[in-house]
Amino acid sequence: MWRSGGALNALLLAAVVLCALSVVTSQHKARKLYIELQKQKELAQQMDVEWGQLQLEQSTWAAPARVEKIAARQLQMQLPRNGQVQFIRVEPNGHLDKQP
């Protein structure tokens, strides 16, 4: 009788040790994943800041006054005079209607 009780106790002890090891392992994995999550959140925040900076830079480079100045200086372009501008309207039936 003691023998079968000792085997049962040994089996239960092994089960408890296995459960304890699995708890420790899962906690370790959870901590590693949490650390990785924090790193990814920080990276996302840095990318948001960079995105904002890029949008600001794009709006600066594409400002109409800057584009016009570069067109005039580097490309020798100029705005057309009133007589040089023509408006073309497309009618719903597909025909073009030129207006001076």
Image (spheres, rainbow, N blue to C red):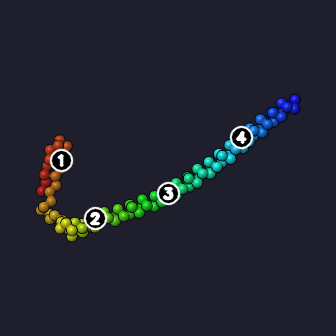
| Depicted 35 relative to depicted 18: above or below | below
* Furthest residue in direction bottom, as rendered: 73
Q: Amino acid at mark 4?
A: Leu
Q: CA distance from mark 4 to mark 1?
A: 79 Å
For image coordinates 48% across by 60% down, the residue present is 46
Please give the residue where the numbered disc 3 appears in the rendered image. 43
Can you tell which of label 4 and label 2 is closer to the viewer?
Answer: 4
Q: Locate residue 37, reporting x and y percent.
A: 55, 52
Q: Residues within 10 Å of mark 3 (few under 14, many from 20)?
A: few
Q: Answer with mark 3 or mark 1, whichever residue precedes in sequence.
A: 3
User: Does 54 sit above or below residue 96?
Assistant: below
Element on which disc 3 rests = helix
In this rendering, would 72 be left or right of 33?
Answer: left
Which label's residue is closer to the chain start, 4 or 2? 4
Residue 45: x and y in percent read 49, 58
Task: Characterize the local packing of mark 2: few (<14), some (14-19) or many (20 or more) Cα atoms within 10 angstroms.
Answer: few
Query: Of marks 3 and 2, which one's residue comes earlier in the chain?
Result: 3
Residue at the far right in the pictured view: 1
Secondary structure found at label 4: helix
The residues bearing labels 3 and 4 have C-alpha atoms spaced at a distance of: 37 Å
Q: SS of the residue at dot 2? A: helix
Which quadrant would the C terminus be assigned to in this image? Answer: bottom left
Name the amino acid, label 3.
Answer: Leu
Disc 4 or disc 1, which is closer to the eye? 4
Q: What whole-number distance in Å separates the C-alpha atoms at marks 3 and 1?
A: 50 Å
Mark toward the start of the polypeptide (4 vs 1): 4
How many angstroms separate mark 3 from mark 2 (CA)? 34 Å
Which residue does the numbered mark 2 point to in the structure image?
A: 64
Residue behind mark 1: 90
Q: Quadrant of residue 83?
A: bottom left
